[in-house]
Amino acid sequence: MRIVFMRHGIAEEAGAATPDELRRLTDEGRDRVRKVAEGLRELDCRPRLIASSPLVRARETAEIVAEVLAPKLEVQELDCLRPGGNFAEFMNWVEHQDVEEMLVVGHMPDIAEFAQRCLTGRVLFSMAFKKAACCLIEFEGEPAAGRGCLEWLIQPGALRRLG
């Protein structure tokens, strides 16, 4: 199984008028996410499942990626991908998915910590995940914490240039 971990795109600033959960992508954020998705297409990214945090900015990111990479897929929302999400719950969900490749959209620092736990079983180091950055982790056999292999971690500028 292959899992592409992605941080959401550039969103509106938090403020009293807009609760964190309702912050939307900016126009620039939407444009950059689309270009990142085009870069993912050049890397032959072909998710058969796309999941997202239920927060608006992550959901919008996932929907744009789906439009570019897999227009027939419906984005699934997972509470375990919201800020402060539960890695064990996420991995339990992953283990029950029968797909070769999936893409999941979440938030920092959780998305980087989930990726690290897939690689090492714990959080050992800091991973840079700019907004709309992506990494691909591949599992031989059943996916489990500490069993993943990092294929690539690409920041959004490089992905946009690929597209």
Image (cartoon, rainbow, N blue to C red):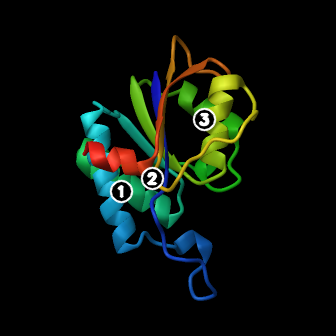
In this rendering, the answer to whether 54 lies above or below 24 is above
Mark sitting on residue 52: none
Q: Distance between the Cα atoms at labels 3 and 2?
A: 15 Å
Question: How packed is label 2: few (under 14 Cα within 10 Å), some, or many (20 or more)?
Answer: many
Please, what is the three-letter code of the amino acid marked with disc 2? Answer: Ala
- Residue tagged 3: 115
| Quarter location, residue 29 | bottom left
Please, what is the three-letter code of the amino acid marked with disc 3? Answer: Ala
Residue 145 visible in image: no
Measured as percent of width and height from the top left, residue 61 is found at: 40, 57
- Residue tagged 1: 33
Secondary structure, mark 3, is helix
Instruction: Say whether marks 3 and 2 touch (CB < 8 Å).
Output: no
> At 32% from the left edge and 50% from the top edge, which residue is drawn?
160
Q: Is residue 11 left or right of residue 84?
A: left
Query: Of label 2 and label 1, which has the lower sequence position?
Result: 1
Which one is in front, 150 or 90?
Answer: 150
Which one is in front, 55 or 65?
Answer: 65
Secondary structure, mark 1, is helix
Q: Is residue 75 left or right of residue 153?
A: left
Which one is in front, 126 or 38?
Answer: 126
Measured as percent of width and height from the top left, residue 26 is found at: 40, 73
Measured as percent of width and height from the top left, residue 18 is found at: 56, 82
Name the outermost residue toward the bottom: 17
- Residue tagged 2: 132
